[in-house]
Image (cartoon, grey):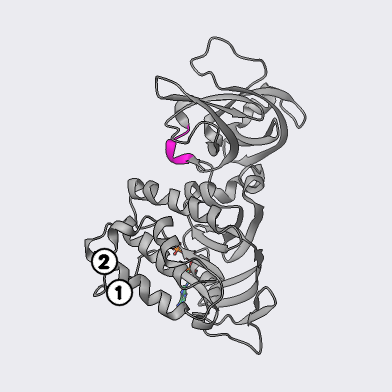
Protein backbone atom coordinates (compact mmCIF):
# COMPACT_ATOMS: atom_id res chain seq x y z
CA UNK A 1 0.00 0.00 0.00
CA UNK A 2 1.05 3.55 -0.61
CA UNK A 3 0.94 6.59 1.64
CA UNK A 4 0.08 9.77 -0.26
CA UNK A 5 0.83 13.03 1.47
CA UNK A 6 -0.23 16.36 0.00
CA UNK A 7 -0.46 18.93 2.78
CA UNK A 8 0.31 22.47 3.86
CA UNK A 9 0.85 23.55 7.44
CA UNK A 10 2.13 26.83 8.89
CA UNK A 11 3.98 27.23 12.16
CA UNK A 12 4.94 30.81 12.95
CA UNK A 13 6.92 31.98 9.92
CA UNK A 14 7.48 28.42 8.64
CA UNK A 15 5.29 26.73 6.04
CA UNK A 16 5.36 23.04 5.22
CA UNK A 17 4.05 22.45 1.70
CA UNK A 18 4.75 18.90 0.55
CA UNK A 19 3.39 16.42 -1.92
CA UNK A 20 4.85 12.93 -2.32
CA UNK A 21 4.12 9.20 -2.10
CA UNK A 22 5.71 6.50 0.02
CA UNK A 23 5.11 2.93 -1.13
CA UNK A 24 6.47 -0.36 0.24
CA UNK A 25 10.07 -0.19 1.45
CA UNK A 26 11.99 2.62 3.08
CA UNK A 27 11.27 6.20 2.01
CA UNK A 28 13.77 8.49 3.66
CA UNK A 29 12.68 12.01 4.51
CA UNK A 30 15.96 13.87 4.53
CA UNK A 31 16.60 17.51 5.32
CA UNK A 32 18.62 19.90 7.41
CA UNK A 33 17.52 20.93 10.88
CA UNK A 34 14.29 22.93 10.65
CA UNK A 35 13.41 21.64 7.16
CA UNK A 36 10.06 20.36 8.45
CA UNK A 37 10.72 16.62 8.82
CA UNK A 38 9.16 16.20 12.25
CA UNK A 39 6.18 18.39 11.36
CA UNK A 40 5.60 16.18 8.33
CA UNK A 41 5.83 12.87 10.19
CA UNK A 42 3.61 14.22 12.99
CA UNK A 43 0.97 15.05 10.40
CA UNK A 44 1.15 11.51 8.99
CA UNK A 45 0.92 10.05 12.50
CA UNK A 46 -2.10 12.23 13.26
CA UNK A 47 -0.37 14.07 16.10
CA UNK A 48 -1.01 17.39 14.36
CA UNK A 49 -3.76 18.30 11.91
CA UNK A 50 -2.37 20.10 8.84
CA UNK A 51 -3.97 23.39 7.81
CA UNK A 52 -5.08 21.87 4.51
CA UNK A 53 -4.54 18.98 2.11
CA UNK A 54 -5.03 15.26 2.12
CA UNK A 55 -3.26 12.21 3.50
CA UNK A 56 -4.34 8.80 2.23
CA UNK A 57 -3.12 5.27 2.78
CA UNK A 58 -4.23 2.97 -0.01
CA UNK A 59 -7.95 3.70 -0.34
CA UNK A 60 -8.26 5.05 3.22
CA UNK A 61 -8.37 8.78 3.82
CA UNK A 62 -6.51 9.61 7.00
CA UNK A 63 -6.89 13.36 6.68
CA UNK A 64 -8.76 15.79 4.48
CA UNK A 65 -11.14 18.70 4.90
CA UNK A 66 -13.79 16.40 6.44
CA UNK A 67 -11.68 13.62 7.98
CA UNK A 68 -9.05 13.44 10.68
CA UNK A 69 -8.49 9.86 11.81
CA UNK A 70 -7.06 9.89 15.37
CA UNK A 71 -3.49 8.57 15.79
CA UNK A 72 -4.44 5.24 17.45
CA UNK A 73 -6.79 4.38 14.58
CA UNK A 74 -4.23 5.03 11.84
CA UNK A 75 -2.47 1.72 12.57
CA UNK A 76 0.98 3.22 12.24
CA UNK A 77 3.98 2.20 14.34
CA UNK A 78 5.98 5.18 15.53
CA UNK A 79 9.64 5.08 16.64
CA UNK A 80 11.06 8.28 18.08
CA UNK A 81 14.61 9.53 18.57
CA UNK A 82 14.32 8.59 22.27
CA UNK A 83 12.90 5.11 22.76
CA UNK A 84 10.06 6.17 25.14
CA UNK A 85 9.76 2.74 26.76
CA UNK A 86 7.61 2.36 29.88
CA UNK A 87 10.33 2.60 32.56
CA UNK A 88 8.51 0.49 35.18
CA UNK A 89 7.95 -2.44 32.79
CA UNK A 90 10.44 -5.09 31.68
CA UNK A 91 11.31 -5.42 28.00
CA UNK A 92 8.87 -8.37 27.73
CA UNK A 93 6.05 -6.30 29.28
CA UNK A 94 6.82 -3.35 27.00
CA UNK A 95 6.44 -5.70 24.04
CA UNK A 96 3.28 -7.33 25.41
CA UNK A 97 1.69 -3.95 25.90
CA UNK A 98 1.89 -3.44 22.14
CA UNK A 99 0.60 -6.96 21.41
CA UNK A 100 -2.46 -6.32 23.59
CA UNK A 101 -3.44 -3.30 21.56
CA UNK A 102 -2.84 -5.13 18.29
CA UNK A 103 -4.92 -8.21 19.10
CA UNK A 104 -7.63 -7.66 16.53
CA UNK A 105 -5.50 -6.39 13.74
CA UNK A 106 -4.99 -8.61 10.74
CA UNK A 107 -1.40 -8.07 9.60
CA UNK A 108 2.04 -7.91 11.05
CA UNK A 109 4.81 -9.86 12.62
CA UNK A 110 4.29 -12.41 15.38
CA UNK A 111 5.91 -11.83 18.78
CA UNK A 112 8.55 -14.53 18.40
CA UNK A 113 9.43 -13.42 14.90
CA UNK A 114 9.95 -9.88 16.10
CA UNK A 115 12.03 -11.01 19.09
CA UNK A 116 14.17 -13.11 16.73
CA UNK A 117 14.43 -10.39 14.07
CA UNK A 118 15.65 -7.78 16.54
CA UNK A 119 17.69 -10.09 18.80
CA UNK A 120 15.57 -9.21 21.85
CA UNK A 121 15.58 -12.69 23.47
CA UNK A 122 18.42 -12.00 25.95
CA UNK A 123 16.88 -8.65 26.94
CA UNK A 124 13.32 -9.74 27.77
CA UNK A 125 13.63 -9.74 31.58
CA UNK A 126 15.67 -6.52 31.73
CA UNK A 127 14.32 -3.10 32.70
CA UNK A 128 14.69 -0.20 30.23
CA UNK A 129 17.21 1.57 32.49
CA UNK A 130 19.52 -1.48 32.17
CA UNK A 131 19.63 -1.24 28.38
CA UNK A 132 22.05 0.64 26.13
CA UNK A 133 20.66 3.30 23.81
CA UNK A 134 20.83 0.93 20.85
CA UNK A 135 19.10 -1.88 22.76
CA UNK A 136 16.34 0.53 23.83
CA UNK A 137 15.78 1.49 20.21
CA UNK A 138 15.57 -2.17 19.21
CA UNK A 139 12.89 -2.69 21.87
CA UNK A 140 11.06 0.45 20.71
CA UNK A 141 11.16 -0.86 17.16
CA UNK A 142 9.93 -4.26 18.35
CA UNK A 143 7.07 -2.61 20.21
CA UNK A 144 6.13 -0.63 17.12
CA UNK A 145 6.19 -3.77 14.95
CA UNK A 146 4.09 -5.72 17.45
CA UNK A 147 1.34 -3.16 17.21
CA UNK A 148 0.99 -4.71 13.74
CA UNK A 149 1.29 -1.43 11.90
CA UNK A 150 0.25 -0.89 8.31
CA UNK A 151 3.19 1.53 8.04
CA UNK A 152 6.15 2.44 10.22
CA UNK A 153 7.08 6.04 11.00
CA UNK A 154 10.61 6.49 12.28
CA UNK A 155 11.73 9.94 13.40
CA UNK A 156 15.54 10.09 13.68
CA UNK A 157 15.61 6.70 15.43
CA UNK A 158 19.42 6.56 15.53
CA UNK A 159 20.19 10.24 16.13
CA UNK A 160 20.80 9.81 19.87
CA UNK A 161 23.24 6.92 19.38
CA UNK A 162 27.01 7.06 19.02
CA UNK A 163 28.61 5.69 15.85
CA UNK A 164 29.30 2.23 17.31
CA UNK A 165 25.71 1.76 18.55
CA UNK A 166 24.38 3.07 15.27
CA UNK A 167 26.47 0.50 13.39
CA UNK A 168 25.16 -2.20 15.71
CA UNK A 169 21.49 -1.41 15.04
CA UNK A 170 21.63 -0.72 11.28
CA UNK A 171 21.86 -4.43 10.37
CA UNK A 172 18.58 -5.03 12.24
CA UNK A 173 16.90 -2.35 10.16
CA UNK A 174 18.38 -3.92 7.03
CA UNK A 175 16.91 -7.27 8.12
CA UNK A 176 13.53 -5.66 8.78
CA UNK A 177 13.50 -4.38 5.22
CA UNK A 178 14.05 -7.82 3.79
CA UNK A 179 11.61 -9.62 6.12
CA UNK A 180 8.79 -7.09 5.66
CA UNK A 181 9.29 -5.83 2.09
CA UNK A 182 5.64 -4.73 1.72
CA UNK A 183 5.70 -2.47 4.79
CA UNK A 184 5.97 1.24 3.97
CA UNK A 185 8.55 2.81 6.27
CA UNK A 186 8.87 6.58 6.46
CA UNK A 187 12.34 7.17 7.84
CA UNK A 188 13.19 10.71 8.92
CA UNK A 189 16.89 11.45 9.12
CA UNK A 190 19.44 14.17 8.62
CA UNK A 191 22.23 11.56 8.35
CA UNK A 192 22.99 10.62 4.75
CA UNK A 193 25.05 7.58 5.73
CA UNK A 194 21.99 5.93 7.29
CA UNK A 195 19.78 7.00 4.43
CA UNK A 196 22.22 5.60 1.85
CA UNK A 197 22.27 2.23 3.61
CA UNK A 198 18.56 1.84 4.15
CA UNK A 199 16.43 3.85 1.78
CA UNK A 200 14.77 2.73 -1.43
CA UNK A 201 13.45 6.22 -2.12
CA UNK A 202 14.27 9.63 -0.74
CA UNK A 203 12.34 12.86 -0.30
CA UNK A 204 14.63 15.82 0.30
CA UNK A 205 12.95 18.61 2.25
CA UNK A 206 14.29 22.14 2.16
CA UNK A 207 12.52 24.93 4.03
CA UNK A 208 9.28 22.97 4.12
CA UNK A 209 9.23 22.10 0.39
CA UNK A 210 10.15 18.92 -1.48
CA UNK A 211 13.37 19.93 -3.22
CA UNK A 212 14.14 16.51 -4.73
CA UNK A 213 12.57 13.08 -4.64
CA UNK A 214 12.95 9.71 -6.30
CA UNK A 215 14.79 6.40 -6.07
CA UNK A 216 17.77 6.71 -3.73
CA UNK A 217 20.25 5.60 -6.41
CA UNK A 218 19.03 8.37 -8.74
CA UNK A 219 18.89 11.24 -6.26
CA UNK A 220 22.24 10.53 -4.59
CA UNK A 221 24.02 10.34 -7.95
CA UNK A 222 22.44 13.53 -9.32
CA UNK A 223 24.93 16.44 -9.46
CA UNK A 224 21.99 18.85 -9.16
CA UNK A 225 21.16 17.43 -5.73
CA UNK A 226 24.65 18.12 -4.36
CA UNK A 227 23.82 21.59 -2.94
CA UNK A 228 20.82 20.09 -1.14
CA UNK A 229 22.71 17.15 0.31
CA UNK A 230 25.89 19.08 1.19
CA UNK A 231 29.08 19.00 -0.85
CA UNK A 232 31.01 16.93 1.67
CA UNK A 233 28.18 14.45 2.20
CA UNK A 234 27.20 13.96 -1.42
CA UNK A 235 28.04 10.60 -2.93
CA UNK A 236 26.47 7.90 -5.08
CA UNK A 237 25.63 4.34 -4.11
CA UNK A 238 27.13 1.49 -6.09
CA UNK A 239 25.96 -2.12 -5.87
CA UNK A 240 28.75 -4.67 -5.59
CA UNK A 241 29.10 -8.41 -5.09
CA UNK A 242 31.67 -9.66 -2.59
CA UNK A 243 34.15 -11.87 -4.45
CA UNK A 244 36.66 -12.68 -1.70
CA UNK A 245 38.23 -11.51 1.54
CA UNK A 246 42.00 -11.23 1.29
CA UNK A 247 44.59 -11.82 4.02
CA UNK A 248 45.37 -8.12 4.54
CA UNK A 249 41.79 -7.26 5.54
CA UNK A 250 41.08 -6.11 2.01
CA UNK A 251 38.14 -7.55 0.13
CA UNK A 252 37.54 -7.78 -3.59
CA UNK A 253 34.14 -6.67 -4.85
CA UNK A 254 32.72 -6.84 -8.33
CA UNK A 255 30.71 -3.92 -9.68
CA UNK A 256 29.12 -3.55 -13.10
CA UNK A 257 32.12 -1.41 -14.15
CA UNK A 258 34.96 -3.48 -12.74
CA UNK A 259 36.59 -4.66 -9.56
CA UNK A 260 37.11 -2.69 -6.33
CA UNK A 261 39.40 -3.56 -3.44
CA UNK A 262 38.13 -2.24 -0.10
CA UNK A 263 38.85 -2.70 3.60
CA UNK A 264 36.40 -3.58 6.35
CA UNK A 265 33.83 -5.49 4.31
CA UNK A 266 31.96 -7.82 6.70
CA UNK A 267 29.47 -9.29 4.23
CA UNK A 268 29.65 -12.92 3.12
CA UNK A 269 31.26 -13.92 -0.16
CA UNK A 270 28.64 -13.88 -2.90
CA UNK A 271 26.40 -11.34 -1.16
CA UNK A 272 25.46 -8.01 -2.67
CA UNK A 273 26.31 -4.84 -0.78
CA UNK A 274 25.66 -1.15 -1.22
CA UNK A 275 28.77 1.03 -1.27
CA UNK A 276 28.38 4.72 -0.63
CA UNK A 277 31.25 6.42 -2.42
CA UNK A 278 31.60 10.08 -1.51
CA UNK A 279 31.93 12.47 -4.43
CA UNK A 280 35.00 14.04 -2.84
CA UNK A 281 36.77 10.65 -2.85
CA UNK A 282 36.48 10.18 -6.62
CA UNK A 283 39.25 11.55 -8.84
CA UNK A 284 38.91 11.73 -12.63
CA UNK A 285 41.68 10.98 -15.10
CA UNK A 286 41.46 11.18 -18.91
CA UNK A 287 43.81 8.18 -19.24
CA UNK A 288 44.07 4.91 -17.38
CA UNK A 289 46.57 5.64 -14.62
CA UNK A 290 49.29 3.15 -13.78
CA UNK A 291 51.60 2.69 -10.83
CA UNK A 292 49.20 4.18 -8.30
CA UNK A 293 48.74 3.02 -4.72
CA UNK A 294 45.04 2.45 -5.34
CA UNK A 295 43.83 -0.46 -7.44
CA UNK A 296 40.40 1.07 -7.76
CA UNK A 297 40.16 2.46 -11.25
CA UNK A 298 36.85 2.20 -13.10
CA UNK A 299 36.13 3.25 -16.69
CA UNK A 300 33.29 5.81 -16.66
CA UNK A 301 31.35 8.09 -18.97
CA UNK A 302 30.43 11.64 -17.96
CA UNK A 303 26.65 12.20 -17.92
CA UNK A 304 26.06 15.56 -16.20
CA UNK A 305 28.15 18.45 -14.93
CA UNK A 306 27.01 20.91 -12.30
CA UNK A 307 29.07 24.02 -11.69
CA UNK A 308 28.31 27.09 -9.64
CA UNK A 309 28.50 25.36 -6.27
CA UNK A 310 31.62 27.03 -4.96
CA UNK A 311 35.12 26.08 -6.11
CA UNK A 312 34.10 22.53 -6.97
CA UNK A 313 32.07 21.05 -9.79
CA UNK A 314 29.91 17.95 -9.40
CA UNK A 315 30.22 15.42 -12.21
CA UNK A 316 27.70 12.63 -12.75
CA UNK A 317 29.24 9.45 -14.15
CA UNK A 318 27.98 6.21 -15.61
CA UNK A 319 30.11 3.30 -14.42
CA UNK A 320 28.87 0.16 -16.15
CA UNK A 321 25.19 0.17 -15.14
CA UNK A 322 25.98 1.96 -11.85
CA UNK A 323 26.37 5.66 -11.28
CA UNK A 324 29.10 7.57 -9.53
CA UNK A 325 29.46 11.17 -8.53
CA UNK A 326 32.76 13.06 -8.49
CA UNK A 327 33.49 16.45 -6.99
CA UNK A 328 36.47 18.00 -8.68
CA UNK A 329 37.91 21.52 -8.79
CA UNK A 330 35.85 23.59 -11.26
CA UNK A 331 38.89 24.55 -13.45
CA UNK A 332 39.57 20.83 -14.02
CA UNK A 333 36.42 20.65 -16.17
CA UNK A 334 38.13 22.88 -18.73
CA UNK A 335 41.64 21.54 -18.20
CA UNK A 336 40.53 17.94 -18.77
CA UNK A 337 38.04 18.95 -21.48
CA UNK A 338 35.26 17.07 -19.69
CA UNK A 339 31.74 17.22 -21.11
CA UNK A 340 28.71 14.92 -21.19
CA UNK A 341 29.71 11.83 -23.18
CA UNK A 342 33.43 12.04 -22.33
CA UNK A 343 34.99 8.68 -21.46
CA UNK A 344 37.51 8.78 -18.63
CA UNK A 345 38.60 6.87 -15.53
CA UNK A 346 37.41 7.25 -11.93
CA UNK A 347 39.96 6.62 -9.20
CA UNK A 348 38.61 5.64 -5.79
CA UNK A 349 40.90 5.49 -2.81
CA UNK A 350 40.58 2.06 -1.15
CA UNK A 351 40.57 3.47 2.37
CA UNK A 352 38.01 6.19 1.71
CA UNK A 353 35.00 3.85 1.73
CA UNK A 354 34.30 3.47 5.45
CA UNK A 355 32.92 0.12 6.68
CA UNK A 356 29.91 2.06 8.02
CA UNK A 357 29.16 3.13 4.44
CA UNK A 358 28.75 -0.48 3.37
CA UNK A 359 25.18 -1.72 3.64
CA UNK A 360 23.44 -4.95 2.78
N1 LIG B 1 5.12 25.17 17.62
C1 LIG B 1 5.86 25.85 16.73
N2 LIG B 1 5.71 27.18 16.58
C2 LIG B 1 6.42 27.88 15.66
N3 LIG B 1 7.34 27.32 14.86
C3 LIG B 1 7.55 25.99 14.98
C4 LIG B 1 6.83 25.19 15.92
N4 LIG B 1 7.24 23.89 15.79
C5 LIG B 1 8.19 23.90 14.82
N5 LIG B 1 8.37 25.15 14.34
C6 LIG B 1 9.30 25.56 13.27
O1 LIG B 1 8.95 24.81 12.12
C7 LIG B 1 10.13 24.47 11.39
C8 LIG B 1 10.15 22.97 11.12
O2 LIG B 1 10.34 22.28 12.32
P1 LIG B 1 10.55 20.70 12.35
O3 LIG B 1 10.71 20.30 13.78
O4 LIG B 1 9.48 20.06 11.57
O5 LIG B 1 11.93 20.55 11.56
P2 LIG B 1 12.91 19.29 11.45
O6 LIG B 1 13.30 19.19 10.03
O7 LIG B 1 12.27 18.10 12.07
O8 LIG B 1 14.13 19.78 12.30
P3 LIG B 1 15.17 18.94 13.24
O9 LIG B 1 15.96 18.07 12.31
O10 LIG B 1 15.99 20.02 13.89
O11 LIG B 1 14.33 18.16 14.24
C9 LIG B 1 11.30 24.98 12.19
O12 LIG B 1 11.69 26.22 11.63
C10 LIG B 1 10.73 25.18 13.57
O13 LIG B 1 11.39 26.24 14.23
**Is residue 201 positioned above or below 67 on the image?**
above
Q: Quadrant of residue 186?
A: bottom right
Q: What residue lies at 53% left-to-right and 51% top-to-bottom?
A: 198
The crowding category of the residue bearing disc 2, from other C-alpha atoms within 10 Å (few below 14, some 14 to 19, many at least 20), is many
The kind of secondary structure element at disc 2 is: helix
**Residue segment shown in magenta:** 353-357
181 or 306: nearer the viewer: 181
Q: Give the image location of residue 303, x and y in percent.
A: 73, 35
**Does residue 94 appear left or right of residue 240 in this picture?**
left
**Is residue 16 positioned above or below 262 on the image?**
below
Q: What residue lies at 29% left-to-right and 57% top-to-bottom?
A: 122
Q: Give the image location of residue 238, x and y in percent.
A: 60, 37
Q: Quadrant of residue 116?
A: bottom left
From the Cβ of disc 2, is ligand 1 less than 8 Å away?
no
Q: Earlier in the sequence, mark 1 or mark 2?
A: 1
Residue designated by label 2: 128
Q: Is-magenta flag for residue 130?
A: no
Do labels 1 and 2 touch, CB within 8 Å?
A: yes
**Is residue 238 positioned above or below 93 on the image?**
above
Q: Give the image location of residue 158, x and y in percent.
A: 40, 56
Q: Main secondary structure of the magenta part?
A: helix
Residue designated by label 1: 86
Separation (CA) of disc 1 from disc 2: 8 Å
| Residue situated furthest left in the rendering | 130
Q: Quadrant of residue 222?
A: top right
Q: Give the image location of residue 334, x and y in percent.
A: 69, 26
Amino acid sequence: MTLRIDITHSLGGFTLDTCFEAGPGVTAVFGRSGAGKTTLINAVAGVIAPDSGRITFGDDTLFDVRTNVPPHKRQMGYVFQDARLFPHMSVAKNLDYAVRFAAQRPQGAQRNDVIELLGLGPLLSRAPHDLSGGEKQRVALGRALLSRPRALLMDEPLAALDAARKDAILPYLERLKSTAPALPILYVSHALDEVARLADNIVVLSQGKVAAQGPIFDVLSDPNAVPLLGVRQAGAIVCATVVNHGPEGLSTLRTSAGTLTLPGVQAAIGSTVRLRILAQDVILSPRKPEGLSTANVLPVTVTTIKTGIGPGAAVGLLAGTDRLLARIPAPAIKDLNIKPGTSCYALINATSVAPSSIGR
